[in-house]
Amino acid sequence: MNFDIPTLLVAAALTSAVAAGARVLLWRMHPEVAGLAQWMWAGIASPLALLLIAGHVALSMLPLLSLAQILIVGGLILAWDGFSRFTGRPRASTPILTTIGAITLGTIGLAHFEGSISVRSFTNAALIAALSGLIARDLLSAARAKRVAMRATGWAYGANAVFFLGRAILVARAVHGDGQWNPDGYAALPLLWWSGITVAITLGMVLMTGERLQASLDRQISVDPLTGVLNRRAFQLLSEKEKDWAQRHDRSLSLMMMDLDHFKQVNDHLGHGGGDDILRHFVAVSKLVLRGKDALCRIGGEEFVAVLPDTTAAQALAAAERLRAAFAEGSERAAPAASVLPFAITVSIGVSELGPDEDIDSALSRADAALYRAKAAGRNRCESAYPLACAPSQT
C-alpha cells in the first residue's frame, strides 16, 4: 500500500495541532493543576516537529530534521515532567536528563556526518520508546483503583513504547535502509500511529484532569476543612453503608460519640486559633488510638463521632477509654498556651452498639444519651449506652 508521505505529515501536524489546542485550553481553564503547563508545551512541540520533518522532505535540509528530533524528545521530556508534577512523584534527575540530551545530540551529529537517516530513525524510535515506557511506569504505579483515566493513559504510553521499540528493531535490521521517505507502509505507519496516539493521550490528559477535579470536589463536600476528617454529610453516608453491611452479614457495629469538655472556656482563654489547635490535636490522638478501618467524623463544633465496624459495645468502651486517657495525658501539648488554663482539656465519650434492625439515628441517639451521662457524672469519662430494649424513653 502506497501513501503520500508529505500529505500524511501535514495531516499528522494538523491532528497534533488540534490536540495541542485542547491542551492549551485545558491549561487556561485549570492553571492551578500541576503539570498542565508542561503537557501544553509538549503538545505544541509535536506539530512543530512534524512541520519541520515535512520541510526536510520537501527541501532536503538536514538541520530541519535535527530540530524536529530535538523537539520530539524535548516534548516527551516535558510530558514526563508534567506527569511527575501531576502525580506528585519525584521528577527526573539532572543526570538522567543530561544523558538523554547527550544521546540525542550525539546521534544528531553522527547522522549528520554519516548522512544516515537510519541512525536518526533508530535513535529517535528508541528514545521515544524509553521515555514512553518511563511515563507508563509512573502512571500505572501511581494510579489508584478509581483513577481509570490515569490507568488508561498509562497503557496508551505503554502501547506507544512497544510500538516504537518495534520501530527501532525494524530500523536496526535495515528493513528499508536509508530510504525512510518511500511511500510504503513501513514509512507511513509511524505517522498514522503518532496521530492516533497523540489524540488518545490528549484525551487521557483531559480525563485525568477531570478525575482530579472531581476528587477535589468530593473532598470538599465530604471532609471537614479544619481537621481533615469526614464531615456530617459523609458520616451519614458512611454510617448507613456500614449499617447495611453489618446487618446483612450479622456483624457488630458500634458508634462512639465524643464531646470535648469545657470547649467554650477553651475558646475564651485561648481564642479560636487555640481552640482549633485543640481540635486538630484531638484528631491526631484519635487516629493513633483508632484502627485503620474505623472512621472519625466531625459533626459540629467540638463534637465528633466514630464508626467502629466489627466492634461490640464492650470493645468500643475499651477503645473509648484508651482515647480518653491518651487525650487527657497529652492535651497540654496541644496548644502553646494550654498549660495556663485553669482546667484540664479532656473529652467525654458515649458508645452504643447497633441493635438488630436498629437504624443509625437510634443508635446515635443512645450514644448521645450515654455521652450526656458522662458529662453529668463529672466529665472526662466514658459511658456505654443502655441496651436497645432497656433504653429509657426520649419523650
Image: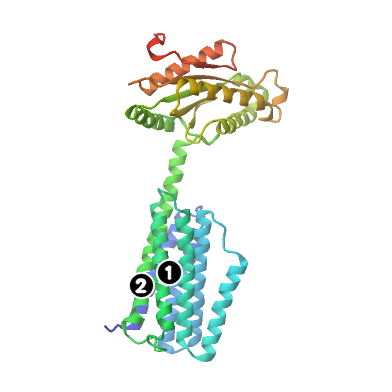
Residue 226 lies, with reference to residue 314, above or below; the image says: below
Q: Can you tell which mark lies on residue 191? A: none
Q: Can residue 129 be seen in this view?
A: yes
- At 40% from the left edge and 77% from the top edge, which residue is drawn? 167
Locate residue 31, reporting x and y percent.
50, 55
- List the residue tagged with mark 2: 193
- List the residue tagged with mark 1: 161
Residue situated furthest left in the rendering: 1
| CA separation in Å, label 1 and label 2 | 12 Å
In the image: residue 84, left or right of residue 195? right
Q: Is mark 2 on a helix, strand or loop?
A: helix
- At 45% from the left edge and 71% from the top edge, which residue is drawn? 129
User: Looking at this view, is 203 or 379 the one in front?
Assistant: 379
Instruction: Indicate which disc, 1 or 2, sits on the residue closer to the N terminus.
Output: 1
Locate residue 153, reporting x and y percent.
40, 60
In the image: residue 252, left or right of residue 102? left
Locate residue 66, reporting x and y percent.
50, 82
User: Looking at this view, is 168 or 368 the one in front?
Assistant: 168
Residue 211 lies, with reference to residue 115, above or below; the image says: above
Which of the two discs, 1 and 2, sits closer to the camera?
Answer: 1
- Colour pattern: rainbow
Locate residue 1, reporting x and y percent.
26, 83
Residue count near mark 2 (Cα–Cα under 10 Å), binned few <14, some 14–19, many ≥20: some
Quadrant hosting residue 346: top right
Location of the C terminus by quadrant is top left
Residue type, mark 1 in image: Ala
- Give the tally of numbered discs: 2
Residue count near mark 1 (Cα–Cα under 10 Å), binned few <14, some 14–19, many ≥20: many
Residue type, mark 2 in image: Trp
Q: Is mark 1 on a helix, strand or loop?
A: helix
Quadrant hosting residue 342: top right
